[in-house]
Image (tube, rainbow, N blue to C red):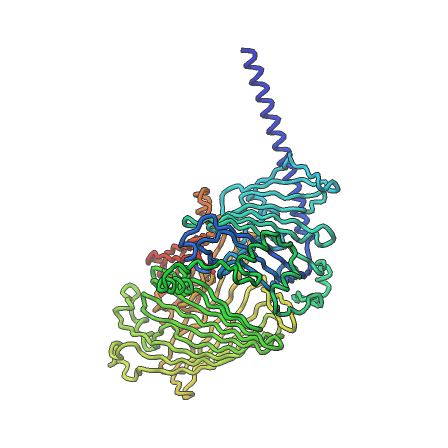
Amino acid sequence: MMWRTVTSVLLLMLCAMNMVAATSTDFVADSLMKVLSERLERKEFAVGEFYGKLYIKQYTNADKSNLLLNMIPDMTRFDRKEKNYLTELFYDIHYLNYTIPDVHRKANITTHQHGSGEMERILGYMSPDIYSEDMLDEGYISPIHGTNHKNYRYRIDANYSDTARTDLNCRKILFEQRFDNIKLFDKGWVLLDDSCNIHEFYVEGWDEQSRFNVCYKMGHEGLERFIAKDISLTIYYKFAGNKLTINAEGRYDIDAVRGADAAEKTTHNYNLTGNYSLVPEIEAISDKLDYATKNRLIPLSASDSLLYMIKGVLGNDDLNENKSNESLSAPVRWLWTLGDEMISSHSMEWEGGRLKIYPIINPSYLSYSSSRGLSYKFALNLNNRFKNNRELNVKPMLGYNFKQKVLYWDLTSTYLFDPANLGRITLDLGIGNRTYSSVVLDKIEKTVIDSLDFKSLNLNYFENQYLNVWVERELFNGFEMRFGVDYHRRKLKGEVGAINESEHLNLKNKYTQFAPHLRFTWWPGMYYYIYNGRKVNVGSKLPRFSFDVEQGTNGVLGSNSVYTRAELDMQYRKRINGSDVLYMRFGGGGYFYTKDVYFVDYAFLHNNNLPIDWNDEIGGVFQLLDGEWYNSANKYLRANFAYESPFLLFQKMLPQVRFIKHERIYLNLLAISHLRPYSEWGYGIETPYIDVGLFASFENAKFHRVGYKFTISIFRD
């Protein structure tokens, strides 16, 4: 009995000692991380500017693969028999205050058939900056910054000893996430010396269908101590029975580097240009194999060279074994090729120019909402640069709405003629939102809201074909003026008599609109830099203000719509901390001094039939508002709010659900015609696979309906 008592006491004492030791190591770790965070706040690790080269060597092993792997849009293509692939990527890089990465791919050598999805994805992990509040392209929450310490646990690794570098007294601090979330790193460690300088940084995490780990090793001398010069990456990719392992090594060769203080001395106000004499001109590469031989920062192994020879990369095409489809019959081979082309992006490049064709078939181009139905879009992008940094960009977009049974299209062409002042000429033509004539406004105003049904009113719409031309130029930093003309041809879809011809005998089947158009946009506090005589705006921390006015005229090119439309708009994106963002938008406008028939078609309040993606609709979209309302009131006031965070409601209620990238809360308010006010309350979730939003709308403070919206994001560009 006594031995049991003694044993129990000893066990309790041992547990207490372990708890004290653990608490002590946790306290030391927290203290060191706090010192590191304080140094970050004082910008002691800031690098003003550097340029050099980035080399990436990437090995890909297709452990398991099936037909679905090659059906993923924009995925790198894999042969049926080949398992191992090698890719080399060469970049010229230039960073200014880490806020302006300028990365140019000089050459790439690969044994893949075609497709660059996984190749380009690697670049997102190769950032030389590990000190930012969020990391990597997907915005992972950094465990280094003090604002993020509440999301991680820290402790000293008591077993760490570094015999390789006896000159440094380093400690390894282990960290792990406090709760599961895709935006948090699962675990990792940071190697600190007595001055809290980081020497190595290792993280593990996951994204979409893959897990990854990446290790950053800092430089050893001068300012290069604050730059990750050697980066090791492993990605384990799993999807529908496919397993890929990607191992990549990245190395930076820094040619020149300046501190933050030196960069600030050469800037004025919001000008981040600094001394760009450090940066040499970028030259075109004529022989990529010769370029690779001279600029390869990590030598090829014997097996690397042998693989290149077998695949014919080094010029021996007789040894090329890439014949995976030869056993297929000609019709099957043709269908295989056609399908492959339809799910791939295609690029054509020439001196100064590039044409990118996005995949014709891609689930991420589908979107559905309960109010607008199913829609699909497709886009191209042509960019051509001329002498003196002048540039032409042409972007056609095509979309179909299955509920409205309308094919929308838009062709926007912009020519940059004055790079130093952002002087541009833009031509925009296409088929836009269907609109209603002003003759129905009185009819809507006289109708009681409870009995208002747009379908029963027989409000036949007008098809809208447009051609807009304008010139815009920055008058001073952050302040742009746009002047041009809008030309619309509107054709009535249906019989005129459907809108009570006896009341509107003068209503026509066709209307033409010619309207001079003026817009002022002011974004105060705009940061920018000048590169080769071209001004590049980076962004601002302040709100953006816009004023838009349009004057319909009579008699020009058959125009018969007379009106004055004026609108004000303010948009603001406020970062609360490293992970939370608040979006706000306010505005209003209306039609004034109207005469005869005109068409309500606002610049800042409209149905976006060709949205770019889910994020394109954050800044003030009314998801459940019937499309008829946008064109049925001659004045409006609006306010939109959205709060975005990885940790809001769902994550706290179900912490074991870890695939949420962002949660968003929406509040949209609108005063228009009978709806004073109209409001929408919404909640949305963004995941690696699908984005979903649930909304409830209220008309005049009375509940109206519930609706939803979702888009597929698993194959998003």
Residue 436 horizontal/vertical position (percent): 34, 75
The quarter of the picture where residue 493 lies is bottom left
Asked whether, in this view, residue 620 is left or right of residue 155, the answer is: left
Residue nearest the viewer, comparing 112 with 359 = 112
From what the image shows, is residue 455 above or below residue 511? above
Asked whether, in this view, residue 573 is left or right of residue 712, the answer is: right
The quarter of the picture where residue 336 lies is bottom left
Q: How many marks?
A: 0
From what the image shows, is residue 471 above or below residue 31? below
The quarter of the picture where residue 421 lies is bottom right
Residue nearest the viewer, comparing 264 with 446 = 264
Residue 269 horizontal/vertical position (percent): 67, 66
Residue 669 horizontal/vertical position (percent): 42, 61
Asked whether, in this view, residue 167 is left or right of residue 620, the answer is: right
Residue 186 horizontal/vertical position (percent): 53, 44
Residue found at the very far top of the displayed protein? 1
From what the image shows, is residue 647 above or below residue 434? above
Q: Residue at x 64, y 34 (%)?
A: 159
Q: Residue at x 43, y 57 (%)?
A: 70
Is there any visible trace of residue 19 in the rendered image?
yes
Is there any visible trace of residue 667 in the rendered image?
no
